[in-house]
Amino acid sequence: MSNIDPQLTQQIVQLLATYGTPAGIAAAQAVGTGAVQALGSGAAKAVKSLWGKIRHKSEQEGGIVEVAVTAFEAAPQDTEHQQALSFVLKQLCSADSAFAREITQLFKEVQRDPVAEQFIQNISGNAQVGIAGANYGSVTIHQTTHQGGINKEDFAKFGEEIERKHQARILFLKAENATSLVECERFIREALQKYPDLPGVRSFLGLRVSNAVIEHFTYQLLTDTLVQPERLGTSVIPMFYEQFALMNPAPPKLEAIHWLEKALQYQDDPEGEVTAALALMYGYSDAYDLMLNTIQKARTLSPSLISSFQRPVHLMMLIYACHSLTSIEEVMRSISLQLPKLEEVQQALREASDPKNNPSNVIRLSIEWFGIELTTEGISRTPVKVRIYFPHKEELTTYGEITRRGQPSTIIPTQPTTDGIIKTFIPVDQILKQLTDKGIVLITLI
């Protein structure tokens, strides 16, 4: 918490009463140009920013804070409104040190102006303060309610409200630093009990839980296809697969959906990230129609989110909700993709085999795709990895390999011997044909 000098809040209020609001400026001008001199452009800009900060803060807080600020804005010369705003500022600064620093800094910028400096000196040195004429020798809270003002009982409630919000923000900070989802959610629930409209809290938890679900899906995808983690940019490495599984026994999909949906109900969707995460959670939860609708909403909010959906892991989460080749193609179209065709596969092989495209100098002999397997019952839930080796430069023939979880690799074309030596090679188009015959559909490059 941050304590602020009561005299400073009084000076800020008096400055705003004369120079900060349209009504105050009009009242000052009505007194005459000899009574109030104009501020320089720099100071006037700082006063405008100061009032803007206070106005924005009041809209964030709502309730009695917004009432006090709105009342002051309408009639800044009213003594009760000045007293109410001064009290509100003191309470807000006590609960929010960042806000206190911001308005203090802006007030100091105003003080650099000679006219403002003289005005503030007059406030500090006289009982009759500024144009408003409010006596701040001692601030008295009246028992009666002024038109548009706030009474003593309101102030008491306001003090309690500010304290609850301050405690809620502390709990939110603890949630941000929590090491476990259970602990994080506990802090969030406690924070919401104290401050149900706490900004950003629901999206934070929803995105954190959904990230845990994505991590779990990534782990499952890696173990199913034996893809090296660095290919997906993940920190989960093979020697820790089993430990990771024990730490994350089941993905909290429903919990993620709950908090993401709650965030959207409160219009808490920074840059469309909540909507995008919700589409992924619907996909992994096999909610096909909800997933498609949410993808469209995400695209409407921010077209740039399409690139997020196109990432291999995210795309495979969306494909998880598909039960037919037609539905896969529909999902691909919804994120501006299509299933790989011969030309795209050949182009990918050419680019990957070009040394100029391999700055790390790591020797590569093939490229890999995630794929799915069509069955008589629809689509296998277990993805496959398809590896196609670089074709011979002159003969343009090669071979492929299908990796399924818990099964030996399948070589395309079938080899005449089982000694592990590849002796038969075919063109890339024949490899793709044999993949199709086996019900394998390429989805995305890894």
Image (cartoon, grey):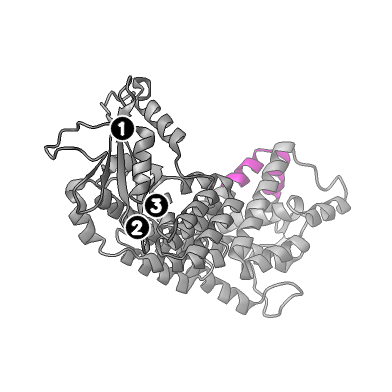
Where residue 443 sits in the image (x, y, percent)?
A: 41, 46
For disc 2, the neighbor class at 10 Å (few under 14, some 14 to 19, many from 20) is: some
Q: Which mark is residue 426?
A: 1
Q: For this view, does 330 lie left or right of residue 113?
A: left
Residue lying furthest left: 419
Badge 2 or badge 3: first in the primary sequence: 2
Q: Is residue 76 visible?
A: no
Frontmost of labels 2 and 3 is 3
Q: Is residue 307 visible?
A: yes
Residue lying furthest front: 416
Q: Which mark is residue 212?
A: 2
Frontmost of labels 1 and 2 is 1
User: Within the image, what quadrant is residue 446 found in?
Assistant: top left
Magenta highlight: main SS = helix
- Kindly identify the amino acid type of the residue bearing the numbered disc 1: Ile
Q: For this view, does 142 lie left or right of residue 89?
A: right
Residue 158 vs 135, above or below: the answer is below
Frontmost of labels 1 and 3 is 1
Q: For this view, does 243 lie left or right of residue 289?
A: left
For the record, the magenta segment spans: 104-122
Q: Secondary structure at mark 1?
A: strand
Badge 1 or badge 3: first in the primary sequence: 3
Label 3 belongs to which residue? 316
Q: Are marks 1 and 3 in contact (CB under 8 Å)?
A: no
Where residue 297 sits in the image (x, y, percent)?
A: 58, 57
- Kindly identify the amino acid type of the residue bearing the numbered disc 2: Ala
For disc 3, the neighbor class at 10 Å (few under 14, some 14 to 19, many from 20) is: many
- Kindly identify the amino acid type of the residue bearing the numbered disc 3: Met
Badge 1 or badge 2: first in the primary sequence: 2
Name the residue located 70 percent from the left edge and 51 percent from the top edge. Answer: 15
Q: For this view, does 419 lie left or right of residue 226?
A: left
